Amino acid sequence: MSKKYSTAYDLYRFFAHHNLNMHIRYYNEHKRLASNQVTEITRELGVGDVDPKCKRDLEFVKHVYLNSYTQHMIINAFLMMYSHFEECLTVTLRILVKSSSVKGNKTGLEGFKEKFRERCALRLTDGPRWAFLQDCSKIRNALLHAAGNISLLPEGKKLELESVINSNHHVDVANKRLVLHEQILEYFRNVIADFVDWLTDAIEKQQAKSGTGDSQVGSPAS
């Protein structure tokens, strides 16, 4: 094994970063394939006389690829990265408390914050960019529970999300529906990676002080 990945902590970082990069590659590959489809459709439309019905169908498909398809790809990649982040937190927590089930009074990021504080004496809010991760949690909930339709959210959740939109240039709204800009994927990937590094360092320092060692820290499934 290379010196770079010689400890369990290093393996944890490696797999977390690797999986994040795979989500970005997934998006980029689908983006490339969609671009190829647009090029092919444009070529077909430019070849002599095209049956009117066929032309309408091709133009519609091209419009989908150039507009809604891209947004769906961004949302899918965003949700996969968020799921990966929660997986990292869940696996880490279970390993630290030596239990396959860790129950708490709260759910989502607030639940993780509570569990890490109470069970492991770690404050997740001390980590970098926690506020952005909380914003992503609100975005994720709106996408999953209301398909991004802000008008369907309870008033309190609606106000929270509007605050996120006003303060975050990676997110917008059109026709009362959330719109994620492509740049959010790279930024989100970097924030999660930074947070995983911070959390791993915090665990390593804590266990070094207690003499536990690094044998209890594993890596999420790759």
Image (cartoon, rainbow, N blue to C red):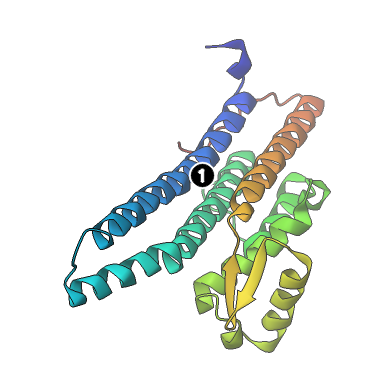
Q: Residue at x 57, y 29 (%)?
A: 14
- Residue displayed at 16% across by 72% down: 51
State the image quarter where residue 8 is shown. Answer: top right
Vertical arrangement, residue 83 with respect to residue 91, above or below:
below
Q: Position of residue 220 (x, y in %)?
A: 52, 38
* Residue depicted at x 53% and y 33%: 15
Query: Observer-nearest residue: 182 or 210?
Result: 182
Q: Image quarter for residue 5?
A: top right
Which residue shows up at 74% across the image and 64% down it?
168
Q: Is residue 210 above or below residue 143?
A: above
Which residue is at the far front?
48
The quadrant the C terminus occupies is top left
Please provide percent x and percent y for residue 10.
62, 25
Label total for image: 1
- 99 on left or right of 37: right
Query: Dot 1, how many residues are within 10 Å of its Cα: few (below 14), some (14-19), or many (20+)?
Result: some
User: In the image, 157: left or right of 131?
Assistant: left
Q: Residue 138, how many percent across, how many down?
A: 65, 68
- Residue 135 visible to an observer of this rendering: yes
Q: Nearer the viewer, residue 194 or 38?
A: 38
Q: Is residue 204 above or below residue 40?
A: above
The residue that disc 1 covers is 24
Q: Estimate the x, y position of residue 54 in percent, counting from the top left.
A: 19, 71
What amino acid is labelled 1 in the image? Ile
Q: Is residue 105 visible?
A: no
Q: Quadrant of residue 140?
A: bottom right
Secondary structure state at the residue bearing disc 1: helix
